[in-house]
Image (spheres, rainbow, N blue to C red):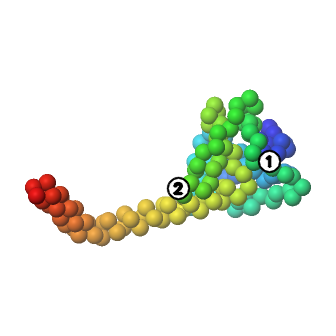
């Protein structure tokens, strides 16, 4: 398979139980087959750290304005989609095979964002459980206030 960003040959890489494809001698992008990215997108999941820092060949220039084609479904254009909660990381997705292309550094950003999101969700859950009665009182007060607004 060829890299959708710089056309170099992709190299298979064993990442835990997955075999993913990386652009080792080119732009340092990573191809994930269907469901593989979801298996490694959180920072707490085991994953080879060296894959987060694949060396990019400085001589390879990537034109981000060019259309990218799926390395598996060569005639299928990749669609840019946001993969993080902040809307900062846009990855390329094949709508036919479900694979994902990440440019260099995007996997690290996705994993950091998902870890931060998980930590935020956990903190919210802890706050909610600690303050359950107070939240119920505030909610009840808002309902009473709404009733008074309707009456007057």
In space, the residues marked 1 and 2 are separated at their CA atoms by: 26 Å
Farthest residue toward the left?
151
User: Can residue 74 be seen by looking at this rendering?
Assistant: yes
Q: Can you identify the residue that label 2 sits on?
A: 85
SS under mark 1: loop
Instruction: Tally the numbered discs.
Output: 2
Residue 18: percent from left, percent from top: 67, 47
Q: Nearer the viewer, residue 103 or 36?
A: 103
Q: Nearer the viewer, residue 90 or 66?
A: 66
Q: Can you identify the residue that label 1 sits on?
A: 63
Mark 1 Cα within 10 Å, few/some/many (few <14, many 20+)? few
- Residue at 14 percent of width and 54 percent of height: 150
Q: Which label was assigned to residue 139?
A: none
Comes first in the chain, label 1 or label 2: 1
Q: Is residue 20 above or below residue 95?
A: below
Q: Is residue 137 above or below residue 6?
A: below
In the image: residue 115, left or right of residue 59: left
Residue 115: percent from left, percent from top: 54, 62
Farthest residue toward the right?
59
Mark 2 Cα within 10 Å, few/some/many (few <14, many 20+)? few
Quadrant of the rendering where the C terminus is positioned = bottom left
- Residue at 81 percent of width and 59 percent of height: 55
Residue 88: percent from left, percent from top: 60, 56
Quadrant of the rendering where the N terminus is positioned = top right
Q: Nearer the viewer, residue 144 or 130?
A: 144
């Amino acid at each position: 398979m060829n890299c959708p960003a710089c056309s170099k040959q992709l190299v298979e890489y064993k990442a835990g139980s997955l075999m993913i494809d990386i652009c080792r001698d080119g732009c340092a992008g990573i191809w994930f087959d269907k469901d593989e990215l979801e298996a490694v997108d959180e920072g707490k999941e085991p994953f080879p750290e060296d894959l987060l820092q694949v060396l990019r060949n400085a001589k390879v220039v990537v034109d981000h304005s060019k259309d990218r084609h799926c390395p598996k479904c060569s005639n299928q254009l990749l669609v840019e989609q946001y993969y993080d909660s902040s809307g900062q990381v846009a990855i390329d997705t094949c709508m036919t095979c479900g694979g994902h292309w990440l440019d260099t550094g995007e996997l690290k950003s996705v994993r950091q964002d998902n870890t931060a999101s998980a930590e935020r969700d956990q903190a919210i859950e802890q706050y909610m459980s600690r303050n359950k009665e107070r939240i119920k009182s505030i909610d009840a007060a808002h309902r009473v206030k709404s009733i008074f607004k309707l009456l007057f």
